[in-house]
Amino acid sequence: MKRAARLIVFYAGLLGLWTLLAELKIWPPYLFPTPWGVGEALYAGFQDHTFLIAIAVSMRRVVIGYAISIVLGMVLGLGVASSKFLEETMGGLLVSLQSLPSICWWPLALLWFGLSQNAILFVVIMGSLLSVTLAMEDGRKQMPKIYGMAGRNLGATGFQLFWHVLLPASLPFIVSGLKQGWAFAWRSLITAEMLYLSLGLGQVLMMGRDLNDMSAVIAVMILIIAIGYVVDGVVFKTMERRLQNKWGLSPAS
Amino acid sequence: MSTNAHNFPAPITIPVDSRIPPDGVRAKTTLGVALRPSRGISSDVPKVSLDEVCLSYRDQSGHRLLALDHINLQVKPGEFLCIVGPSGCGKSTLLHLIAGLHQQTSGQILVDGKLIKGPGTDRILIFQELGLFPWLTVGQNVEFGMKMKGLGKAEREEKTRHYLRLVHLAQFKDSYTHQLSGGMRQRVALARALATEPDVLLMDEPFAALDAQTRDLLHDELERIWSETGRTIIFVTHNVREAIRLGDRVALLTFRPGRVKREFPVDLPRPRVLEDVHVAHAAREILDELREEINRSLEVEYNLGVKPRVPTGVGE
């Protein structure tokens, strides 16, 4: 209750400050839009279904891209974690590649895949693959060895061992990396969409720019933040809470 | 020619031979010894047999250390063997070798007269730290081995219920392991091991971390389950009284490298009580021998900071 009150006060204050600055008319409204201007843009966007379509298109892309990088990242991460050679060679490369913003792949992606969905997907995958890989590698290393031994002892081998023992045993250690991977995937997606007429949220945002409609731009920014927040707060928080309850890691279970 | 030679002993000769056994067997039967038809299930084949088992490894500084030195042990089917020794004598490692989780440097480990190849569900190890899966419920933990074996759901559920009842945990089937006490977790591990229906149960200091009351209770339960299921048990402990309380036989290992110093048959009637005078008396005898090893282990552990190398009993 108290927490809710604090949040309301904070956001009301923020909104008040914004209104005040807009009302002072220091800058013209096309440079500094008003809160109600943004509200109207949001309403209009949902009214004519632009936003709904954009959200659907963007979500579809990010889900596909993220899913692919999870699968690839798990294979890569496990490989790096279980081979000394791969760790020394690939491991270092992966860490250094992480400093490369995934949008740098855009020119190559265009050449390889053409001006298409796949080019966007490629950038999304390159954005999140590394975090997932590193998280998986880390999780596999942090995971207590006893679980693997107990699994083999009880007759699990090969894929069985991976699926029923190694993967669930390392999940608490990789969940934060998966979360980071999601954040990277989402950011890469929006960036790529801004560079290409693609129906997604990124393109709607650029459309606002082209029309010099800053209210629309901010409206889309709010949408992007909101979706990121909801996925993080709903999907990952639920996953974390369930893991903590199962493992007995939560303070009050 | 060669094809004939291969074909010759095939179907035609068998009906004739079936009445008259081959020479070797006939020679024995004439001695009047009642032989069983197959030697594979005869009780004189040890359930577990360790044959000159050695294990060495390199420590951080690259020195070769001998952990286990020519271990010879035979365990009869249905026997309860306890292995005692000071910490660091390699008794846990020995269990890992029998479980097939590690590979010995030389020597052989046979189960039912056959060389073991890696882990197998005929021998299940209960780890000292248990290794229960925290992401699974108690019931799912017990079910795990059966699921890996590919048993049907109905059969798994029935057996899970059976083994949970055996360790008195039926009502905790849907709990997670962190919600249980240490003694209860210990029993889950026991049920999980039993549920794969292994011939040999390997137990690595399973009761070391428990309070005395819980431990006494689990001794009774383990003894009951052992006599009910007829499993062969190899039980590692550093507690000599516990070894005598439970074992048909106690093998004493030396400190670094681990050798079988002596084997003590325990002929006391069951059920035994930990505080019993006879148990204490038998323990005294083993303790006297063990003390020597413990002293050596303490010497090494206290000197380790000064001398980089283990001073006694290191191979090469």
Image (tube, coloured by chain):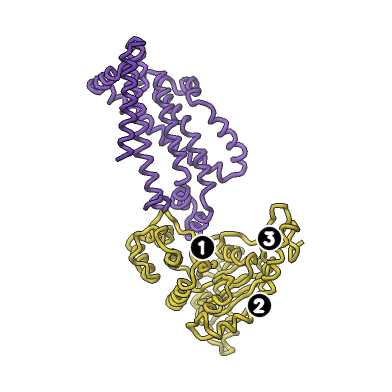
Dot 2: few (<14), some (14–19), or many (≥20) neighbours within 10 Å? some
Query: What residue does disc 1 label?
Result: B120
Is residue A135 shown above or below A251?
A: above
Q: Colour of chain A?
A: purple
Q: Marks 2 and 1, Cα distance to the nearest angstrom?
A: 29 Å
Mark seen at residue B262: 2
Is residue A119 shown above or below B35?
A: above
First reached walking from the N terminus: tag 1 or tag 3: 3
Judging depth in this view, the residue of A131 and B6 nearest the camera is A131
Query: What residue does disc 3 label?
Result: B56
Is residue A108 shown above or below A139?
A: above
Mark seen at residue B182: none
Q: Amino acid at mark 3?
A: Ser
First reached walking from the N terminus: tag 3 or tag 2: 3
Q: Colour of chain B?
A: yellow
Question: Which secondary structure lies at badge 2?
Answer: strand
Judging depth in this view, the residue of B251 and A35 nearest the camera is A35
Q: Chain of mark 1?
A: B
